[in-house]
Image: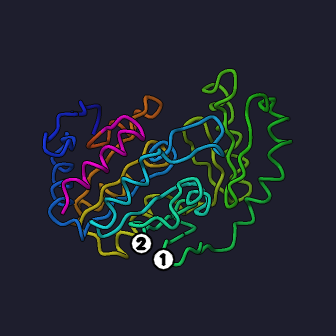
């Protein structure tokens, strides 16, 4: 799509931003016209929660759950799609036991895990054996590379991630590690998913695009809003773009970040981080009956 201005002009009655593309305007119109056939799908970190230096301290924006609880009963479905374990996202989001979110679904580990509010249970396949092997090898691997200072390893259950945000030069450390970690992942049958100063080693064939497409087909969605902030969300953006050609209206929202211009360039609407996402959810709720 290329770089484009992202208009924040809005309908004064609802404070909804105006999408800058025709496809985005069609997606928003379909969501407003047929909300019971629409899905709102949202990334967690950077979209519903601010990015923090320690991911274990991430929590949903304080207004996120109230906005979702107001909006969800008016839609076909609301889903949170994250690279985190589903149970962790539920805890950090505060999603369990909330009136209005009785049918919320959380697709964790890029869709490999699923939590739904109806059962309160996480469904998941057996972990990939390569993850355990990489987990054991990583500390020594980083030490041999001389890249351990300022980097740290995050346990994600079905994946393992190396963060460089705390390094003296986060970008240089990220680039220095990208190739070697790719080779390490390949040796153990895994792939590397780059993000905002993080490289995640995880099983292949699982991404947000595949998870989103499968879920939308499951619920027979006719419209979808997807909001994300990171490189891992590009697969979901691509899925929505493909689904548009199959008759599913789509609205792509970037939770604005200068760190990931690729996402902003492909979005129909750019908002100012999690606070902007929450405002958008509230504006949608106010427009729907």
Expressed as whole percent of the image width and height from the top left, the position of residue 69 reads: 38, 60
In the picture, the quarter occupied by the C terminus is bottom left
Q: What residue does disc 1 label? A: 118
Bounds of the magenta segment = 270-289
Farthest residue, direction top = 168
Residue 98 visible in rendering: yes
- Say which residue appears at 64% left-offset and 38% top-offset: 178
- Say which residue appears at 22% left-offset and 53% top-offset: 286
What's the mark number on residue 148? none
- Say which residue appears at 58% left-offset and 48% top-offset: 193
Residue 19 visible in rendering: no
Using residue 11 as the reference point, say whether residue 126 is left or right of it: right
Task: Tell me the element at label 1.
Answer: loop
> Which secondary structure type mostly characterizes the magenta part of the structure?
helix
* Earlier-in-chain disc, 2 versus 1: 2
Contact (CB < 8 A) between labels 2 and 1?
yes
Expressed as whole percent of the image width and height from the top left, the position of residue 75 reads: 28, 66
- Say which residue appears at 63% left-offset and 74% top-offset: 125
Using residue 249 as the reference point, say whether residue 96 is left or right of it: right
Find the distance from the CA under tag 2 to the CA under tag 1.
6 Å
Classify mark 2: residues with Cα within 10 Å, few (<14), some (14-19) or many (20+): some
Q: What residue does disc 2 label? A: 103
- Of 48 and 183, the residue lying toward us: 48
């Amino acid at each position: 799509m290329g770089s484009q201005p992202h208009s924040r002009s809005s309908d004064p009655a609802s404070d909804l931003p105006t999408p800058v593309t025709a496809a985005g305007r069609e997606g928003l119109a379909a969501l407003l016209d047929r909300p019971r056939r629409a899905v709102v799908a949202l990334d967690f970190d950077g979209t519903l929660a601010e990015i923090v230096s320690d991911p274990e301290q991430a929590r949903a924006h304080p207004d996120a759950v109230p906005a979702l609880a107001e909006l969800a009963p008016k839609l076909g479905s609301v889903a949170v799609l994250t690279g985190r374990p589903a149970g962790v996202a539920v805890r950090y989001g505060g999603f369990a036991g909330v009136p209005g979110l009785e049918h919320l679904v959380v697709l964790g580990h890029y869709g490999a895990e699923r939590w739904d509010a109806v059962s309160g249970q996480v469904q998941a396949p057996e972990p990939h054996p390569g993850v355990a092997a990489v987990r054991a090898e990583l500390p020594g691997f980083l030490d041999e590379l001389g890249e351990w200072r300022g980097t740290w390893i995050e346990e994600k259950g079905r994946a393992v991630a190396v963060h460089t945000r705390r390094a003296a030069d986060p970008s240089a450390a990220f680039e220095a590690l990208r190739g070697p970690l790719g080779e390490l992942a390949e040796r153990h049958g895994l792939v590397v998913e780059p993000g905002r100063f993080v490289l995640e080693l995880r099983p292949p064939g699982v991404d947000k695009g595949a998870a989103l497409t499968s879920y939308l087909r499951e619920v027979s969605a006719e419209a979808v809003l997807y909001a994300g902030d990171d490189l891992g969300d590009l697969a979901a953006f691509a899925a929505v773009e493909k689904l548009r050609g199959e008759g599913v209206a789509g609205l792509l929202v970037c939770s604005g970040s200068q760190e990931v211009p690729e996402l902003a360039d492909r979005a129909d609407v750019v908002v100012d981080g999690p606070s902007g996402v929450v405002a958008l959810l509230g504006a949608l709720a106010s427009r729907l009956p």
